[in-house]
């Protein structure tokens, strides 16, 4: 990560030291400043070109390979950001998260392949993906979000498992109790083989300055672009009424409820937004790999995204990117160890979590609180985040209203 | 009717296995509010230990040991081994995180689970390992009227039920059991009462893992084979069972397990084996929507 | 952005690229290629590793043997390991290495049909196209999609399915209980078999076992209630042991009141011992022969070598494709060896054309591909459990 805050401090060494000493919330604050994020994304966008340049001018080969791996990193970073929204911001343990990714990719694959002979234009396909994932999110979310904590986790897990099974089974007419439903030869999901020959987005294959753009590089950029967009929205969103309501609910639902926050509405909003984000990521992925396949739904994938989000640090957007990179690349790098690679990875994972329970860049603690309204730590972290933007009186009052926490004058700035 | 009865018995046998593993989830959740994702893999390791013992003594021509004794040895090794493993996991992966945020131990649990699966995969076998059950216990079939069931299945059912009753007595009738319940209710208050919370947690982990180890032995004897990935699927089912019963509730886990087994075999038997699991998880969702706290769980209140 | 560069270095070390490789150094010796790489691709870790791990061991052994015999005119072949984890996405990432590196001359694998179908277009579009020889992808579309890069040494679903169905019909089947195990291979095969049976007016009942299922009591009770006279279980794993044990416990005795036909992995003679003889009389067919069950010095030597390399009990862990994986690697390596070397380079286009035209010597005898990429005259072996071993009854040509 380009985490060196040299651009806004005079003396590099001094700035680095201060950066290091600022702790996780300080790191986050620094890393989410436009002065860091903008160059980061610019560099990220240039990486494939740099790799290509190196490949063209040396005997090293691997520009396409590494661009694809980085595209996978970017994809997982998008998913981790989306998961961060639902878990890190809203405190909803959605263990069926990856199902929405799968639904998005299958929805796109169905309207962009020969499976049911539909080839929608990009905007219509995007609309379909959004509508379908939203429909599923509401279907699960509306009843499930009335549950609390771990029960929500389990209902969503069950939903994920059902989707896994349905994807495998809806390749032939279901036979229930001896009766076949639907006509012979009905095949929606193509079962274990997945949907193939999915059309990529109809985008220009060459641009004025850059010349011809290979498929994989285009999708790397799309993922990085979507990641940048998501992060931009998240950062904006965090300081709105909605963002603060989420934090308040995560910290103390009772208190939030008492303060008149419509808990259900805000939870559903977070749940659906994250689902739609995952769905869109799934759609881009289907177009990148020309496939929608059942492993998209595997529970292990949810676990993987959870590991990324938590390893990076819940509530931290740079953490999501860091976690995605830290968990995506090792299996590729450790490839020659084959059977041993996951042993190594699992040990590292446990050690890192024990040493840094809140994640590499995490500031949020989801501890069940013994003291009602015990939201002080969080609020401190949050108001520190907000230091850059002066919090106006109305905002402070709103924080007080939403969370039931009386801010110290210092926090009010 | 006899078809129904047979399927019901199939379900009860399978369900008792779910219940045994579900108890582990529920015990640990009750004490620590921790979803111990590695529990299914502790069960797997227990089963492998038992398989190892069985292979050692059954294929060994030097000393002819009667089958019954081998089974006792298998039980001792699997229960002890799994128990110690559970305590070790708690010590290494959960205790340092006891005061950390709730999701951190979830991730270390995933890490431990990944480690155990891959360790067995690499160092023991990527394929299934067979348990010479026919040399150990009777493979006969019990027939009562229209109902028939293999003795090993009956053993699975009886063994699980016996152990569950013993556990229930332990938790509700002994001094240590009340210490466990006190810790589950309020860890801090329990400390004030002079309860050694660390010890209670350790014993709970030992008990939960030992139950899984016991389940592993019965599993090996019933199905004659173990593989590195078996803990995953069974873990999810057992976890589901624990939730249906009301997670944290011991009796709930037992009933939940049996119910899930029966549900699975009846939906497979009468509706469709293809959609069997779909129905099981659908049932879970329905139960939770109607009774969010599970069948036997206390209504969830905020801990004040 | 220091990190990617470090990672690149690690990757270079890991993959074993010599930084100063380059084609310019090769001058006089025309016949010795500078560098030859092939890749092994399949699910080598994770739930599908049951079939992948043994196949990888076999491929590693094949490369070792090939190199010991002199490699490609003295150049040692390097093996890249691509653990695709049964996902098209990971597979594509790895294949990018091969697509952009012209010294990667072919792939042994991918093992899962789903992965092949998802990634073959990319391999086909590479320039030059990157050929692959699969050891286990059985879906008909793998070689029916007119991809010139696609080859496989195993039999096709539509060869095995109808052959299986016909076998049961010939044996007088009236009602067949068809089971799949919800995997790529198993569902495709069960579909083919069921289709053929239905077309010949045989009553069928279709059921599914869950992946990794151990408790078959529900299904066994169902078999009894169905009154089927044949049980057909399409599966590549060792689940037959459980099914047969539990059938026998419920008084469904193979050869007496029910007949049993299994598929790959179920022609394993250890099942007989592990079911205490309950498997005696059962039939099994396979798309990839188990070398241990094929007589002949080549296969028996291979089995010996495999055991010597990976331990005496390694065969029981090797899965159903450790024979076909070795065979596929042999085919690919020989095609590479037959290809001309120009300026220290072998072209993939030549490898591809040699794959199509040459006849290869493998542990299972000579192999030649037809125009689609299937083995010519390849067939299905039908086994029967007799006494303590599986006996080859006949070979049905595909």
Image (spheres, grey):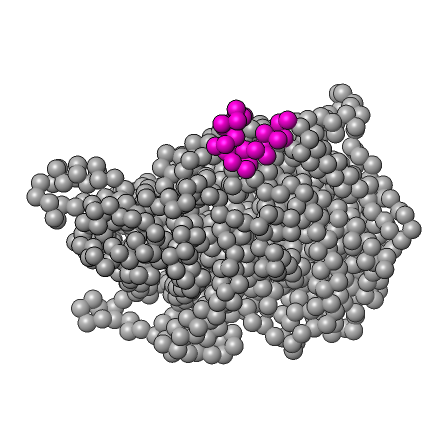
Residue A412: tell me if it is visible.
yes
Q: Is residue C57 above or below residue C143?
A: above
Closer to us: A210 or A159? A159
- On screen, residue A249 versus residue B200, left or right, reads left
Magenta residue span: B175-199
Where is residue A347? Give x, y as percent.
43, 35
Which residue is situated farthest in the right direction here? B145
Q: Is residue C69 above or below residue A158?
A: above
How many numbered dots are placed on residues in this image? 0
Where is residue A406? Give x, y as percent.
29, 48
Is residue B176 one of those drawn in magenta? yes
Closer to us: C178 or C338? C178
Q: Is residue B61 above or below residue A309?
A: above
Identify the residue at image location x=24%, y=58%.
A395
Q: Quadrant of residue C106?
A: bottom left
Identify the residue at image location x=55%, y=59%.
A159
Residue C24: tell me if it is visible.
no
Closer to us: A349 or C335? A349
Q: What is the chief secondary structure element of the magenta stretch?
A: helix
Where is residue B115? Give x, y as percent.
50, 38
Closer to us: C394 or C98? C98
Which residue is situated farthest in the left direction here? A10
Which residue is situated farthest in the top direction here? B63
- On screen, residue C164 versus residue A274, left or right, reads right
Q: Quadrant of residue C387?
A: top right
Is residue A185 one of those drawn in magenta? no
Identify the residue at image location x=59%, y=68%.
A170
Identify the residue at image location x=70%, y=68%.
A176
- On screen, residue C164 versus residue C257, left or right, reads left
């Amino acid at each position: 990560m380009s985490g060196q805050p040299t651009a806004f401090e005079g003396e590099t060494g001094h700035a680095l030291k201060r950066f290091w000493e600022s702790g996780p919330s300080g790191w986050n604050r620094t890393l989410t400043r436009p002065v860091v994020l903008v160059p980061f994304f610019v560099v990220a966008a240039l990486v494939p070109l740099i790799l290509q340049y190196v490949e063209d001018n040396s005997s090293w080969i691997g520009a396409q390979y590494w661009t694809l791996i980085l595209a996978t990193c970017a994809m997982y970073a998008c998913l981790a950001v989306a998961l961060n929204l639902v878990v890190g911001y809203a405190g909803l343990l959605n263990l069926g998260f990856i199902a929405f990714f799968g639904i998005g990719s299958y929805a796109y694959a169905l309207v962009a392949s020969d499976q049911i002979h539909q080839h929608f234009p990009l905007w219509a396909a995007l609309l379909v993906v959004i509508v379908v994932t939203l429909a599923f999110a509401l279907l699960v979310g509306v009843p499930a979000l009335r549950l609390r904590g771990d029960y929500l986790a389990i209902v969503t897990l069950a939903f994920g498992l059902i989707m896994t099974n349905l994807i495998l089974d809806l390749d032939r007419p279901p036979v229930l109790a001896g009766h076949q439903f639907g006509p012979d030869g009905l095949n929606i999901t193509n079962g274990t083989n997945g949907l193939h020959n999915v059309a990529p987005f109809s985008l220009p294959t060459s641009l004025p300055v850059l010349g011809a753009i290979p498929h994989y590089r285009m999708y790397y950029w799309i993922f990085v672009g979507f990641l940048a967009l998501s992060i931009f929205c998240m950062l904006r969103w965090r300081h709105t009424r909605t963002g603060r309501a989420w934090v308040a609910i995560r910290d103390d639902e009772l208190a939030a409820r008492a303060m008149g926050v419509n808990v259900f509405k805000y939870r559903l909003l977070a749940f659906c937004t994250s689902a739609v984000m995952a769905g869109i990521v799934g759609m881009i992925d289907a177009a990148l790999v020309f496939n929608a396949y059942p492993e998209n739904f595997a529970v292990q994938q949810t676990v993987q995204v959870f590991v990324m989000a938590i390893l990076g640090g819940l509530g931290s957007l740079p953490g999501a990117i860091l976690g995605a990179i830290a968990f995506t690349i090792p299996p590729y790098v450790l490839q020659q160890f084959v059977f041993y690679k996951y042993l190594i990875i699992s040990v590292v994972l446990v050690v890192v979590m024990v040493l840094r329970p809140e994640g590499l860049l995490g500031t949020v603690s989801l501890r069940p609180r013994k003291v009602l309204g015990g939201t002080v730590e969080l609020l401190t972290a949050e108001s520190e985040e907000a230091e850059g933007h002066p919090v106006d009186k109305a905002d402070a009052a709103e924080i007080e209203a939403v969370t039931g926490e009386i801010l110290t004058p210092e926090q009010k700035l | 009717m006899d078809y129904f009865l047979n399927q019901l018995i199939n379900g009860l046998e399978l369900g008792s296995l779910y219940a045994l593993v579900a108890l582990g989830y529920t015990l640990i959740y009750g004490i620590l509010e921790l979803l111990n994702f590695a529990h299914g893999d502790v069960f797997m390791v227990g089963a492998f230990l038992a398989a190892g013992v069985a292979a050692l003594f059954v294929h060994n021509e030097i000393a002819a040991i009667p089958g019954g004794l081998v089974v006792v040895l298998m039980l001792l090794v699997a229960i002890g081994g799994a128990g110690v493993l559970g305590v070790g996991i708690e010590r290494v992966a959960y205790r340092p995180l006891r005061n950390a945020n709730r999701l951190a131990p979830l991730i270390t649990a995933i890490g431990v689970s990944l480690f155990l699966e891959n360790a067995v995969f690499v160092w023991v076998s990527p394929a299934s390992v067979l348990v010479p059950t026919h040399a150990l216990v009777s493979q006969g079939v019990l027939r009562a009227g229209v109902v028939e069931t293999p003795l090993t299945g009956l053993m699975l059912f009886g063994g699980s039920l016996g152990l569950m009753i013993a556990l229930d007595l332990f938790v509700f009738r002994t001094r240590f059991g009340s210490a466990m319940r006190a810790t589950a209710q309020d860890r801090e208050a329990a400390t004030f009462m002079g309860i050694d919370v660390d010890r209670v947690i350790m014993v709970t982990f030992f008990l939960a893992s030992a139950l899984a180890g016991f389940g592993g032995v019965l599993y090996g004897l019933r199905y004659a084979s173990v593989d590195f990935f078996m803990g995953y699927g069974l873990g999810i089912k057992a976890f589901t069972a624990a939730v249906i019963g009301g997670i944290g509730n011991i009796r709930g886990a037992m009933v939940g397990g049996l119910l899930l087994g029966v549900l699975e075999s009846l939906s497979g038997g009468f509706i469709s084996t293809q959609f069997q699991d779909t129905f099981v998880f659908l049932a879970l969702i329905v139960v939770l929507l109607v009774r969010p706290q599970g069948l036997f769980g206390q209504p969830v209140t905020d801990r004040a | 952005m220091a990190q990617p560069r470090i990672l690149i270095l690690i990757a270079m070390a890991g993959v074993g690229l010599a930084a100063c490789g380059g084609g310019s150094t090769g001058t006089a010796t025309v016949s010795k290629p500078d560098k030859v790489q092939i890749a092994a691709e399949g699910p080598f870790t994770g739930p599908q590793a049951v079939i992948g791990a043994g196949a990888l061991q076999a491929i590693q052994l094949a490369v070792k043997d090939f190199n010991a015999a002199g490699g490609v005119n003295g150049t040692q072949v390097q093996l890249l390991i691509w653990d695709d984890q049964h996902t098209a996405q990971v597979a594509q990432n790895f294949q990018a290495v091969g697509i952009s590196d012209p010294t990667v001359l072919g792939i042994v694998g991918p093992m899962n049909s789903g992965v092949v179908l998802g990634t073959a277009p990319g391999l086909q579009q590479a320039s030059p196209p990157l050929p692959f020889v699969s050891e286990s992808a059985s879906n008909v579309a793998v070689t029916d999609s007119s991809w010139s890069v696609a080859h496989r040494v195993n039999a096709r679903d539509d060869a095995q399915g109808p052959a299986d169905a016909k076998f049961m019909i010939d044996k007088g089947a009236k009602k067949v209980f068809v089971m799949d195990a919800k995997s790529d291979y198993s569902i495709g095969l069960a579909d083919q078999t069921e289709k053929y049976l239905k077309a010949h007016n045989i009553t069928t009942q279709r059921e599914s076992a869950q992946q990794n299922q151990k408790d078959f009591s529900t299904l066994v009770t169902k078999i009894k209630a169905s009154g089927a006279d044949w049980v057909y279980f399409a599966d590549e794993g060792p689940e037959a042991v459980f099914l047969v044990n539990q059938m026998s416990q419920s008084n469904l005795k193979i050869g007496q009141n029910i007949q049993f036909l299994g598929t790959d992995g179920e022609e394993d003679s250890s099942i007989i011992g592990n079911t205490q003889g309950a498997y005696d009389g059962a039939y099994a067919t396979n798309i990839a022969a188990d070398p241990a069950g094929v007589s002949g010095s080549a296969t028996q030597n291979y089995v010996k070598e495999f055991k010597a390399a990976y331990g005496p009990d390694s065969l029981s862990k090797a899965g159903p494709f450790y024979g076909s994986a070795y065979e596929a690697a042999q085919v690919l390596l020989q095609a590479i060896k037959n290809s001309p070397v120009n300026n220290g380079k072998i072209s993939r286009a030549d490898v591809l054309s040699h794959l199509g035209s040459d006849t290869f010597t493998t542990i299972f005898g000579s192999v030649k591909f037809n125009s689609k990429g299937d083995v010519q005259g390849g067939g299905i072996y039908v086994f029967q459990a007799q006494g303590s071993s599986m006996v080859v009854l006949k070979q049905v040509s595909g």
